[in-house]
Amino acid sequence: MSLRYLTAGETHGPQLTAIIEGLPSNLTIDFEELNFQLHRRQKGYGRGRRMQIEKDQANFVGGIRHGYTTGAPVALVVQNNDWKHWQNIMNIEPIEGSDEEKRRVHRPRPGHADLNGGLKYNLKDLRNVLERSSARETTVRVACGAIARQFLAEFGIKVAGRVLRIGEIEAPYQDLPIDELIAVTEASSVRVTDAETEKKMEAYIDQIKQEGDSIGGIVECIVEGVPIGLGSYVQYDRKLDARIAQGVMSINAFKGVEIGIGFEAGVIRGSQVHDEIMHTDERGYHRATNRLGGFEGGMTNGMPVVVRGVMKPIPTLYKPLQSVDIDTKEAFTAQVERSDACAVPAASVVMEHVVAWEIAKAFLEKFGGDSMEEIRANVANYNAQLENY
């Protein structure tokens, strides 16, 4: 059984729900750590008022007993505190009232799913599109990824993330040990490693917000301790770097992804791209550099996995762009929904958990097993195989 999850729920509905299938039994769940990861997603300079309302916590309603997974599907919910203000508008039962009372949306926002979703599903109230396409859904994706992250930690695999750029402001790249990187970025309001850059980014976000605009950026995820051989070269859909790329691109507002040096590889020579192979008794096979971001042939090569993603500016603007009213077909400025001026620091956290999920999924496919004990035995056997190669 492959590891998978489904999510359900709307941004202003009563709750967000996720069901995870394929987790082994006897995985210890640290609930405090999981909720800490949800809290991280809510932080970051530039977030809107919604994050002052919600205090996200995952409540488990299946698949965990006495702190351990049982092997059954895990079900979790995250309550939406803002639901109390939307109960009538988002009621499941039919309600009486005008379009204004129902807060019907008929002016689609450029760059959002509003119009495409309305056309596809033949929905004349675009709220039915935006409620589900909202990035609020990433709350439970982070919860699922946080469980995957705890699973990976059992095998010494660590996940970190950082912001590399917000709009015009680029952070100087510092190659830090992963534990230090985690600590330094967590202390930063914009998840960078440089205090001077943090101040510049905060001022820049303030300026963007005052102008009624929004701004995007570039984020990076690093995963250390990943074993050699996750993924495969034998079929396109088993290449782990491709699956990670798909996962990253599925994050709301992400428009690009690269592994390692990424697009730079199309500019420089092969001698400056490929990582020379080394061997020592202490480390076994390894690479002299990590320009390819931990992948060769769709498989992990034992080096840290390095993934970067680019997030476009959030499409909801307080100085809205022009759009067309779907009722009258007349030009209007797009309808405004509450939003963030910049969600790049939060997007960094989401990407960490999306990448962690894909690596955990590939890890389970490689080593199999219905219990943690069985998986540990399979990993030990594989490590012995590698040592004797």
Image (cartoon, rainbow, N blue to C red):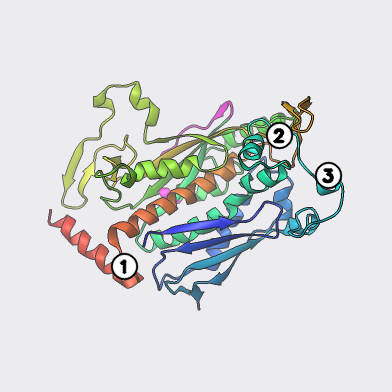
Q: Which residue is mark 2?
A: 108
Judge whether 87 appears above or below 24 on screen.
above
Left or right side of 40 for 244: left
Q: Is residue 339 magenta?
A: no
- Residue 113 lies, in percent from the top left, at 62, 38
Q: How far apart are the two marked residues, 1 and 3, measured between alpha carbons?
A: 53 Å
Point out the frontmost of discs 3 and 2: 3
Q: Are marks 3 and 2 in contact (CB under 8 Å)?
A: no
Q: CA distance from mark 2 to mark 1?
A: 48 Å
The front one of 279 and 38 is: 38
Residue at the disc numbered 1: 369
Extent of the magenta region: 167-179
Q: For the residue carrying disc 3, how many other residues have a C-alpha within 10 Å: few (<14), some (14-19), or many (20+)?
A: few
First reached walking from the N terminus: tag 3 or tag 2: 3
Report the Cα–Cα distance between label 3 and label 2. Answer: 15 Å
Q: Earlier in the sequence, mark 2 or mark 1?
A: 2
Q: Residue at x 80, y 45 (%)?
A: 103
Residue 175 in the image, given as x and y percentages of width and height: 41, 39
Question: What secondary structure prevails in the magenta region?
Answer: loop
What's under tag 1, amino acid-wise? Answer: Gly
**Residue placed at 32% from the left, 57% from the top?**
365
Q: Secondary structure at mark 2?
A: loop
